[in-house]
């Protein structure tokens, strides 16, 4: 199973160094949206910055970005 890495970034970068094994890109998309949604429901922002300043960046095992979206757009964002 491929591994995907889920980074959250604005001026700061919170890297996912462990990654998550998921069956495919669609599963990675669902996982990223779930993580972003849970973060938004738990707090108003992160590191003193509101969610509209944060981006979820998903990379594959090679370190290539496969998709990204603004965390604040989790509810309405299109699939990659």
Image (cartoon, rainbow, N blue to C red):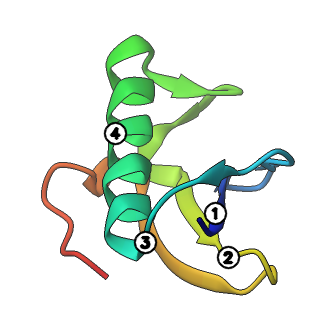
Which mark identifies residue 4? 1
Question: For the residue labelled by badge 4, is the local secondary structure a helix, a strand or a loop?
Answer: helix
Instruction: Give the quadrant of residue 73.
Output: bottom left
Question: For the residue labelled by badge 3, is the local secondary structure a helix, a strand or a loop?
Answer: loop
Q: Tell which circle, 1 or 3, labels the residue nearer the N-terminal end.
A: 1
Residue 10: image location, x then y, percent? 67, 55
The residue singled out by tag 4 in the image is: 34
**Where is 35 relative to 69, above or below?**
above
Q: Residue at x 45, y 27 (%)?
A: 39
The residue singled out by tag 2 in the image is: 60
Residue pushed farthest right? 17
Residue 23: image location, x then y, percent? 45, 64
Instruction: Give the quadrant of residue 2.
Output: bottom right
Q: Tell which circle, 4 or 3, labels the residue nearer the N-terminal end.
A: 3
Is residue 42 rendered to the left or right of residue 60?
A: left
Residue 3: image location, x then y, percent? 67, 63
Q: CA distance from mark 1 to mark 3?
A: 9 Å
Which numbered disc, 1 or 4, marks the residue closer to the eye?
1
Callout 1 crowding tier (Cα within 10 Å): few <14, some 14–19, many ≥20: many
Is residue 51 rendered to the left or right of residue 14?
A: left
Instruction: Give the quadrant of residue 65.
Output: bottom right
Q: Tell which circle, 1 or 4, labels the residue nearer the N-terminal end.
A: 1
Q: CA distance from mark 2 to mark 3?
A: 10 Å
Callout 4 crowding tier (Cα within 10 Å): few <14, some 14–19, many ≥20: some
Q: CA distance from mark 4 to mark 3?
A: 16 Å
Q: Tell which circle, 2 or 1, labels the residue nearer the N-terminal end.
A: 1
Callout 3 crowding tier (Cα within 10 Å): few <14, some 14–19, many ≥20: few
Q: Are marks 2 and 1 in contact (CB under 8 Å)?
A: yes
Which numbered disc, 2 or 3, marks the residue closer to the eye?
3
């Amino acid at each position: 199973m491929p591994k995907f890495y889920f980074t959250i970034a604005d001026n700061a970068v919170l890297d996912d160094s462990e990654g998550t094994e998921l069956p495919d890109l669609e599963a990675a998309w669902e996982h990223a949206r779930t993580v972003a949604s849970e973060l938004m429901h738990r707090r108003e922002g992160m590191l003193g910055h509101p969610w509209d300043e944060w981006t979820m960046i998903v990379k594959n095992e090679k370190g290539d970005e496969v998709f990204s979206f603004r965390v604040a757009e989790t509810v309405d964002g299109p699939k990659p």
